[in-house]
Amino acid sequence: MSCRGPLLLAVDDAHLADAPSMRFLAYAARRLASMPVLLVICTATGQPALDEASRHDLAVSAHRIELTGLPPADATRLLQQSASAPIDEDFAAACHQATGGNPLLLQALLCTLKGPDGRLPTEIRVKDVLELSSPKLADHLRRKLHASPEAERIAQAVAILGDNAEFRQVSALVATDLRSTAHALDTLVRLKILRNTYPLAFTHSLVRNTVLEDMSVGARITAHGEAARLLHEAHAPDDQVAAHLLKAGAATPWAVDTLRRAAGRAMGRGAPDVSATYLRHALTQPLVADQRAKVLCELGNAELAFDSAAGIARLRTALDETTDPRDAANAALNLIPRLAADSTHEAIATADRVAKRLPAEERDLGWHLRCMAFIAAYTDLATAAEARVRRDELCADVPDSPQLRRARLTFLAVREALEGGSREDAVRYARDAIAKADLTVFERPYLYALSVLIRADELDQVEQLCRGVEQEARASGYLRPTAIVLLARGLTASFAGRYAEAAELLQSSLDLFDEWDTSHSDPDAPGCAAALVEVLTIRGRFDEAWQVLSRRDLLGDVPTLLPYSFVLIARGNLRVRTGDVEAGLHDLLECGRRVTAWKVTNPAVFPWRSAAAQAYLALGQHDRARTLAESELESARRWGTERAIGTALRVSAMARDDSEAHGLLTEALATLRNSPAKHQLALTLLDLAALNRRSREPEAARSHLLEATALVRECDAEPLATRLHQELITAGVDHPTATGVGGRLTDQEGRIAALATKGLTNRQIASALYVTLRTVEFHLTSVYRKFGIDGRPQLAEAMGQYGHRSQP
């Protein structure tokens, strides 16, 4: 046949050929050397041939090609051909990682993934791919290892122990001598099942998973129990031992302590879900009553990080079961803040009941419980009067613990701030209370000291502190501390007039609150929602503001808890700005009624009087507006921040005729120039410009308008820009760059828009930037609004039109 053209002679699985066949191939190779015949002989690596001598003769004269895994691009093409559908890049990368690009393993993986209809799932996580096994591959491995049962047992032992398995541990697990173990390992390395490395590891995760899955369930359970014992006796790390205990069947006397230590380490590295898994298994072990209560308490604390309802239920059980007063106190300290969100009376009663059980020497622990009872009582309007008595008792009693002394300083700071006392004293107390920059700053009561600094316009200090611990908050694994950090940063950005940045931060914070606490009962979440609504209202994003309120069921009556007073003032301002002035005024006056009952008079905390005054002005009731504005001005001067004073002066001017207003606005301007309140400063400049225009002082009006221009651009608020535009036209000032915010994207908006132009889905963008899906949707909506487009099809063109880069 070779006379008519080149000929290919292919022989597969030559290692299975008998001796005569191998000798014939060796003979044929020599005879065919001068002919146009290509002889291709395939043999499996690591498999001994039936006739090694003949194979050696063949190898001497042959050109040897060792096949390795396909590169990622070729593996992706193979997957696409096999799947007959487009393959996601992340999915393809995970498949390549699991198989090393080995075509056989890739095909086996696809067979496992395909459904009954032969299609791949539309969504599958990379983590899921790396945990898959393959029945088809299991059959192949069984055939490979059929001649070496010892090697099969060693492979199972390495699979049980996991990557980085120790040689002696493997030998002990299969109960063989070291020489036999070494021989079996060499076989597995030659077969490319294990890597030629030490410690021991499989070549690919798919192979390891398949070996494990092919073991009977009883064998796996027994092997994991024995592995846990061996590792425990070898003093291996607790989390390594605990991983096997989770899969072992029998109880062991040392398991509980090991699982608790491993849980503690998991909490320390920011993995509360892993910690909870260890502790749940600890509950399945034999436990005495007090030991069980301790485990329940630790488990409840871990679950609070990611499942609020489960954590509360677990801590309630711990509190009911423990007989140790100290353990009860520790459980109560974590439980009370969560109880307070749903039942103030239960929270207070729990704190008081547990505190009474404490021995006299636990004075600080009792003070801490009374502290939590005060916080719960003060939050609810029905118990506010009782709370003030509790607060005064706490302030008069100085605890021994330095940390609790800081808590006491927080109460002193809050008393000065809420009741409009000395700003200097409040700031001094607050600074001392949070002098230690760590995550405790974002827990009650220390969190309130941070709030005092924000209301005192100590924004630089707050922002510096937040940025200093933000990485620690994210690394903790707790969603709530990160949400609080973002909330604090969002408030500082809002108070500084950086509204686009504030909206991003507050939306991200609210998303984290929702992810952590699906029941919407966290006491700080309403304040976050209110702050976001305020910012969206100032920016003119009224529809988005209403959506925030609607999603959290804040459109009707709200609870008589202090955080909801922020909701009332934010909702009231939104209603006034969208034309429902009477309903808005009702919300603002209700806020005033509540905070007055709480004895909160400081307008830096609740500026309800200036907001209500503007609503009265819209209704033409100038006398009522003037009375409220003057009352707020008096309180603002007592507190002393330029923002509060300047805002009250400006609103007072709005309630008077031009002759009186000029002096008030001039004083407001001078005051606000010393504050970070850019928005109020811009409004004051616009008011003065309008007053100058009416008084026929065009140069003064022009000067004020041009000064306001830069502030308007910084604030990025469309209603403010619109008003500036109108004033410029009315005043006859030609300044085309002074108005509008269209096309100006924040850094985060720019990053998200750039990724969207590359074709990434919203979910992929969220994963790439480590934000929530709702955050991506929020920012893309903002981008579309700024560019005046309908959606993604027009995004790339708009990005180029406004000079934005197409790459992040």
Image (cartoon, grey):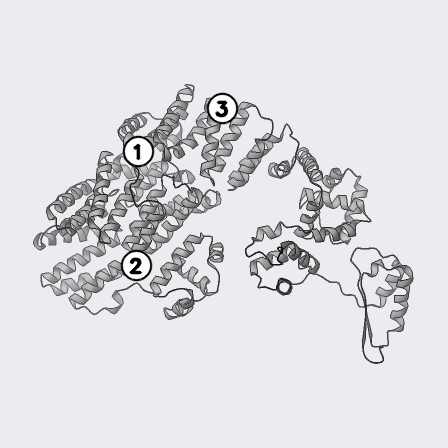
How far apart marks 3 and 2 lie (CA) works out to 56 Å
Residue 647 visible: yes
Question: Hey, which residue is sitting farthest bottom in the picture?
Answer: 4
Q: Is residue 716 left or right of residue 337?
A: left
Q: Secondary structure at mark 1?
A: loop
Q: Residue 599, located in which quarter of the rendered image?
A: top left
- Tell me the quadrant of the picture where the N terminus can be found: bottom right
- Name the one closer to the observer, 108 or 188: 108
Residue 650 x %, y %: 17, 51
Residue located at (55% from left, 34% from top): 279
Dot 3 amino acid type: Thr
Dot 1 amino acid type: Asp
**Residue at numbered disc 2:** 716
Residue 190 x %, y %: 77, 53
* 2 vs 1, front mark: 1
Q: Secondary structure at mark 3?
A: loop
- Name the one closer to the observer, 317 or 273: 317
* 3 vs 2, front mark: 3
**Residue at numbered disc 3:** 322
User: Up-down: is 733 above or below 121?
Assistant: below
Which callout, 2 or 1, points at the residue further toward the start of the chain? 1
How far apart marks 2 and 1 lie (CA) works out to 37 Å
User: Up-down: is 646 above or below 717?
Assistant: above
Residue 455 visible: no
Q: Is residue 357 left or right of residue 52?
A: left
Q: Which mark is residue 380?
A: 1
Which callout, 3 or 1, points at the residue further toward the start of the chain? 3
